[in-house]
Every structure is written in structure tokens, then in C-alpha cells.
Image (cartoon, grey):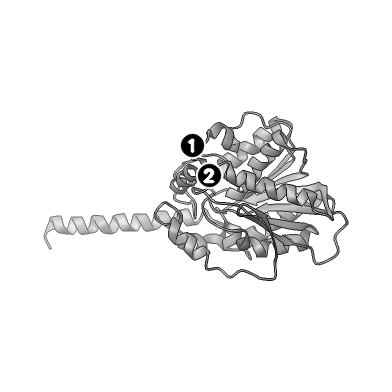
Amino acid sequence: MVEGSRDSVLGRVRAGAARVASRGARLRDFHPELRTYALLLPGAAVGPRTLPVIRRLTGLAPVDPKVEVVHLGEGVSVRVFAPPRPAPVPAPTLVWIHGGGYVIGSAAQEDGWCRRMAEAAGVHVVSVDYRLAPEHPYPVPVLDCMRALEWAADRPGYDASRLVIGGASAGGGLAAALALHVRDHSGITPALQLLTYPMLDDRSRTPDSRHRLWNGTSNAFGWRAYLGDADPHQAVPARRDDLAGLPPAWIGVGDLDLFRAEDVDYAHRLRAAGVPCTLSTFPGAFHGFDAIAPRTTPSRALFAAQVKAVATAVGTA
């Protein structure tokens, strides 16, 4: 082997070793129980090219025919879960909004979580199937969720004074947008907004190789699809200037989530506006960690915090 060729090979070997060492160092930032998942998961799963495939794959998931489904018209429906033990009458209720970057997902994907929450917090859970972007951009998804909230507030046996609105990821962003819409346009007064790693700010782009499932590139795509021609200063919760008068909030996010900075900032802005807000961060956790690894310690801690927040807000703790 000639000298130049050998140096070239050695250079590639050293560069490869450096990349492996760097990846190993980055993996150590993840919670020990999440490292294997972090090693296998992509930085982003959804984009303009993958959207049709991801939608087809998520559509193949089995749907429990025993769940009560109520169709509210115009393509909107809710899946309803009652606690296994008798709830107070009128009953407290959580209106829950699924995630999926505003472009994928369905209420059925949340069935397991909704059952667990209904049992653990002693509440009815109403899980919303809203219409997705880009076919249905803002404000359609927010208005779909508003339709579900109004249905829950009017349903016999439900207590309109003990309603919680919540969601995860894009569902958390919709819950925050719904809280703003309710404040501005409705007489309903939610007891709490439960925002789980909510997608609140279309400007988040920070590159970080530790992001999993949702990074700056996928975030740009999701927001572009959702916003359409809308004014982001009206449609994006983090861009809203006036947060006063909103329901109390609980916000939970992993510290390796793309949304961490925007969620922490939103929590501080809520407090500055006089809105009580509990902020829970989960060390070493990436986006959607509880859905990927529900049996791990961080996921159990997240769920326990969610249950406590809901049960305390509606008086079932």
C-alpha cells in the first residue's frame, strides 16, 4: 500500500472511530432506560415524502370496537372512556387531543392511555378525532376540538365546571390553542390545561443530534401544513402576546425534546401573566418517550404527574 493510500484509509478509520465515540457520548445524555430506544429511533419520522406512508401504517393499527364512539358531524368524532369505579355525578371530564405533528394520528392511538387515565384519575375521558392538516389547516383542528369540548360540557352527567383540556405533542399545542379560543369566544371555564410536551412554537428549529422522532425539519413541515395561509401571530400559541386569564396549566417535557425550550418559555410567560403553571421536566427523555417506552421509570413518572395534575384540578385526588 502506498503512503498516501494508507494515510487516507487511516484517516477514514479515525473519522469513523470519532463518530462512534461521539455517538456514544451523546447516548450517555439519555436516561439509562431510554438509551436503547434512542439508539434505534430516527431523528424524524414525518416529512412531505413519508407522510402518505406513515398515514397508511398508522391506519393499520387495530381499533377496539367496544369503545363508545360519538360522531359530532363534519368528520369529527370522540371516543369516550368511563372510569371503572363509579364517578361522582355530575362527573369530571378530561377532553384529550392526540398528537402527530398536526398531520398524522387518530384518537384510537390513545385508547390505552385514555383507559389508564380514566381509571387512575377517576374521570371520564373524551378523546377527540379532529381533522388533520394539510387538508384541514388552522383553524379547522381547533374548531373541531372546540366542538368536542362543547359536547362534553353539555353531555348529561358531565360536570362543565370540572373540565380539563389536554393533549400530547401537537395535541398539546391544540389544547393550548383551545384554551386561548375558549377564553376569547366561550363561556366554558376549564379547570386545567394539561400540556404534555406541547408543540407551541413554529419557530423552533434548533439542530440537535439527540432529538428523536421529531426534529427541526419535521417541525417546519408540520407547522407549514397546519398554518396554511393563517396569521401565525393568531394561530401559534407561543406567538400570542396576551396569556392572561387562561386556565391553570401543567406542562411536562423531556429535556432532550426539541420542544423543551419553547415549553419552558411558555410556562414562564403563563406565570408572568398570572396563570398558575406547574412545569415538570424529565431528564434524559426525548420526544414521545412515554408512548415508545411506557414501562420505563421516566414514563411512569410522567404518567403519575399527569394523573396528579388532573385529579387535583377536578377534586378526585
Closer to the camera, 181 or 169? 181
Q: Is residue 226 above or below residue 24?
A: above
Q: Which mark is residue 213?
A: none
Residue closest to the far front: 73
Residue 164 visible in the displayed image: yes
Residue 140 image point, x, y percent = 58, 44
Q: Is residue 253 above or below residue 88?
A: above
What whole-number distance in Å separates the C-alpha atoms at marks 2 and 1? 8 Å
Q: Residue at x 49, y 37 (%)?
A: 229
Q: Residue at x 79, y 63 (%)?
A: 83
Q: Is residue 125 left or right of residue 98?
A: right
Kindly identify the amino acid type of the residue bearing the numbered disc 1: Asp
Kindly identify the amino acid type of the residue bearing the numbered disc 2: Pro
Query: Which image quadrant is residue 189 in?
Result: top right
Closer to the camera, 11 or 261? 261
Q: Is residue 257 left or right of residue 40?
A: right
Classify 10 Å Cα crowding around label 2: few (below 14), some (14-19), many (20 and above). Answer: many
Q: Element type at marker 2?
A: loop
Residue closest to the far top: 241
Question: Disc 2 designates what residue?
Answer: 137
Question: Disc 1 designates what residue?
Answer: 229
Q: Residue at x 71, y 52 (%)?
A: 95
Residue 192 image point, x, y percent = 75, 45
Q: Are marks 2 and 1 in contact (CB under 8 Å)?
A: yes
